[in-house]
Amino acid sequence: MSDGQTSFEVVAFTRNHVITGYLSLHDQRLSDYLNDRRTTLLQLRNTVVSRLCDPENIIAKLNSSILPKKGISLIFVPPQPDSPLPRRFIGYTKERHEVLVALEGADVRGIVHTTGPLDAQQILTSLSESFLPITQATVTLGADPKCTIKQDTVLVNVPEIRFIGEIPPT
């Protein structure tokens, strides 16, 4: 798209649903848009909705939809076969910490990047970012532990985190 407008597919998990659709942003990374407190909604096109407990059974296909940011548990950009990859979610910092994050209906195992030691309390209480980037992520659905999704980066809605802990190096 022109004028810095980028459209790409996103997959969002709420507590009970999986929502796939196309999001258009203007000169902005997904993580920046999600953490921008001036906006509270995602406007999606070509939306497909299924239940988290049965993600293969589509319950609705919609031309357009609105998804409140606060209702998102986690969101990611799947591989985009027909277009160049969107800009990276985050600029990587020096320290990498393997974590386990529990959400309602799913858990995420992956890497959190920080400028110093991991401070889980700071992550959960910081007002600066609502969505936490986790790289090299493996998402496991609670309804079907055999159902796992591997993504380069997912963004987890911090208020939806029920548990976070650092996995000790082996």
Image (cartoon, rainbow, N blue to C red):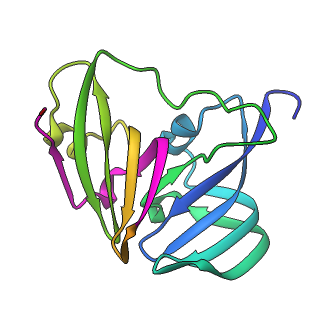
Please identify the quadrant where the C terminus is shown. top left
Could you say where residue 5 lies in the image, as x and y percent from the top left? 80, 34
Report whether 101 appears left or right of 153. Answer: left
> Nearest the camera: 57 or 32?
57
Can you say whether 110 is above or below 55 in the image?
A: above
Can you say whether 7 is above or below 52 in the image?
A: above
Report whether 84 appears left or right of 102. Answer: right
Can you say whether 65 is above or below 159 in the image?
A: below
Can you say whether 88 is above or below 98 in the image?
A: above
For the image shown, how many numbered marks are present on the structure?
0
Is residue 70 visible to us here?
yes
- Identity of the residue drawn at 72% across and 67% down: 47
- What secondary structure characterizes most of the magenta part? strand
Could you say where residue 49 lies in the image, as x and y percent from the top left? 64, 74
Could you say where residue 149 lies in the image, as x and y percent from the top left? 47, 56
| Segment tinted magenta in the rendering | 147-169
Is residue 131 visible to us here?
no
- Identity of the residue drawn at 46% across and 20% down: 91
- Residue 19 lies in magenta, yes or no? no
Report whether 136 appears left or right of 58. Answer: left
- Identity of the residue drawn at 63% across and 52% down: 10
- Residue 148 lies in magenta, yes or no? yes
Report whether 96 appears left or right of 165. Answer: right
Please identify the quadrant where the N terminus is shown. top right
> Nearest the camera: 103 or 64?
103
Q: Residue furthest top?
A: 94
- Identity of the residue drawn at 63% across and 55% down: 42
> Nearest the camera: 107 or 31?
107
